[in-house]
Image (cartoon, rainbow, N blue to C red):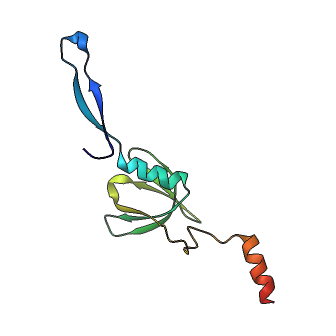
Amino acid sequence: MGPFARYEPVGAGDSGLPLRKAMSVINIQDSFLTAALQGNKHVTVYLLCGVKLSGKVQSFDKYSLVLETSTLEHLVYKHSISAVLICRNRKCTECFPVRSETLAPALESAN
C-alpha cells in the first residue's frame, strides 16, 4: 500500500452487511495542480496533439484547468493533456521574476 492510501470503513452494521475496509486513494492529479496553484508556480502543459502551453494555473476542476499566460487565459480540457510539468529552475525568469528593487542597484552600478 502506497503513502497516498488509507482505509475507511464501508457499509453499515445495521444493514446486516459486515463492516469491511475499502481503500480510499488521494487524487494525485488534484494534489499536483493544487501545489502549482497555491505556490503560484510556472507550469508547462503538453497536450496530446503536441502543443506546449506555459503559464500559471489559475483554477481547475474535475474536467478542465485554466492556464494563465502574460496575455491570455487558456481553458484546457484535462482529457487533452499529456503531461504537466512544474518548473523548479531557480534561474527561470518566469518562475522567479526579478524584482524591480533588486534590479535598481544593478542598473545604478552600471551607469
When the figure is inspected, residue 103 is found, relative to residue 67, above or below; the finding is: below
Is residue 5 toward the left or the right of residue 92 in the image?
left
Quadrant location, the N terminus? top left
**Residue drawn 42% across and 48% down?**
31
Q: Residue furthest bottom?
A: 111
Circle count: 0
Residue 45 pos. (x, y %)? 41, 63
What is the x, y in percent for residue 99? 70, 69
- State left or right for residue 96 relative to residue 22: right
The residue that appears at 24% across and 31% down in the rendered structure is: 22
Residue at image position (48%, 52%) is 35
Q: Where is 15 relative to 57, above or below?
A: above
Picture quarter with the C terminus: bottom right
What's the residue at 18%, 17% (across, down)?
A: 18
Which residue extends farthest left? 17
In x, y percent, where is residue 9?
28, 25
Q: Quadrant of residue 85?
A: bottom left
- Residue placed most toward the observer, 46 or 110: 110
Q: How far across and down, in percent of the image, does residue 95 sit?
A: 55, 67
Q: Is residue 68 left or right of residue 78?
A: right
